[in-house]
Image (tube, grey):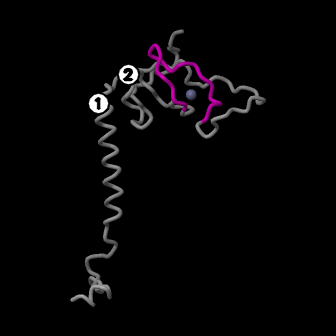
Amino acid sequence: LKPDTTQTPLRVSTHPLYLIDLAGNQAMLACPECRTWLAVVDGMLPPHRSDHQPDQPRRDKTAPRRPRCAASRRPVVLDLSPSTWASEFAIGARDAGMRRGNRVFADPRSESSPQTPVPVPVFRMART
Ligand SMILES: [Zn+2]
């Protein structure tokens, strides 16, 4: 089985990081066409059908099989090392976490509006 050279090679470095998994012994990619996770074999996406969707773990056996995914046998250029992928993926995850944190701590009041004093809770007033 050989890669389909009529298709544009998929450069891993241009594929979204979260659709790549280089943590294992074999490079995994989510197909750019159908999002099926595939192990890269012989420098290409293996032939697969687009009827296997993540939201449909069980295919309807009575339904006619869909044609092969258009990205079947698409050449893959592994131009991203596992260590580069891992560090960039970690940075992306950290940045996403920081963005969430900023939203939580953001002060919606503008600088011109007076700061409303926070009332002291009743249970603390009793002790002071
Ligand atoms: Zn596909």
Q: Is mark 1 within 8 Å of ligand 1?
A: no
Q: Quadrant of the C terminus?
A: bottom left
Compared across the picture, whether 73 is left or right of 112 comes to right
Lower position in the chain sequence, tag 2 or tag 1: 2
Residue 81 in the image, given as x and y percentages of width and height: 31, 25
Element carrying mark 2: loop
* Residue under the image location 32 percent in, 88 percent down: 122
The magenta stretch spans residue 44: yes
The circle drawn on residue 24 is none
Element carrying mark 1: helix
Q: Which residue is mark 2?
A: 78
* Residue under the image location 50 percent in, 14 percent down: 5
Query: Cα distance, mark 2 to mark 1?
Result: 12 Å
Magenta-colored segment: predominant secondary structure? loop
User: Which mark lies nearer to you, 2 or 1?
Assistant: 1
Q: Which residue is mark 1?
A: 84
Amino acid type at circle 1 is Thr
* Residue 23 placement: quadrant: top left
Amino acid type at circle 2 is Leu
Numbered range of the magenta stretch: 36-53
* Residue under the image location 62 percent in, 31 percent down: 52
Residue 100 in the image, given as x and y percentages of width and height: 36, 57
